[in-house]
Amino acid sequence: MMNLDQLTKAIKVWAENRNLHSADPSKQMLKLMEEVGELAQGFAKNNGRQVVDSIGDIYVVLTILSMQIGMNIEDCVEVSYNEIKDRNGKMINGVFVKEEDL
């Protein structure tokens, strides 16, 4: 089984081999919304297999979208993690609310 770094590299090679890395990012954004809709459908229907597939598809689409706009998915994730890593807050009605929004 491949780790996430290996999978991300494989996704990038797959995208480059199909010239997706240089395609119109607005089309990839539409694809992202389609996959998010499928994720919501999976949740609504309590379909675990669809949820897993949709989460994976979203990662693939985001990886390709980041390539199309000249960014690196790993860098984007690192920026986000660094933003949240020291964040505090609490759960309210099942939703994490950051401290500054309380």
Image (tube, rainbow, N blue to C red):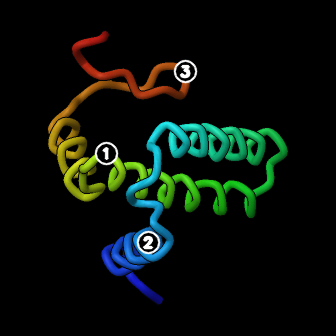
Q: What residue type is labelled 1?
A: Ile
The x and y percentages for residue 69 are 31, 45
For the residues bearing labels 3 and 1, Cβ distance under 8 angstroms: no
Query: Which label belongs to residue 69?
Result: 1
Q: Residue furthest top?
A: 102
Label 3 crowd bin: few (<14), some (14–19), many (20+), radius 10 Å: few
Instruction: Give the position of the C terminus as an image quadrant.
Output: top left
Camera-side mark, 2 or 1: 1
**Who comes first in sequence, dot 2 or dot 1?**
2
Q: Nearer the viewer, residue 28 or 34?
A: 28
Quadrant in the picture for residue 64: bottom left
Numbered-mark total: 3
Residue denoted by label 3 = 93
Label 1 crowd bin: few (<14), some (14–19), many (20+), radius 10 Å: some
Say above or below: 96 vs 27.
above
Q: Which of 44 and 79 is in front in this view?
A: 79
The x and y percentages for residue 21 are 39, 60
**Who comes first in sequence, dot 3 or dot 1?**
1
Say above or below: 33 vs 58.
above
Say above or below: 70 vs 20.
above
Q: Which amino acid does label 2 sit on?
A: Ile
Q: Which of 28 and 82 is in front in this view?
A: 28
Residue denoted by label 2 = 11
Could you tell me which residue is drawn at 69 percent across and 38 percent down? 37
Could you tell me which residue is drawn at 54 percent across and 52 percent down? 58
Could you tell me which residue is drawn at 45 percent across and 52 percent down? 23
The x and y percentages for residue 75 are 20, 53
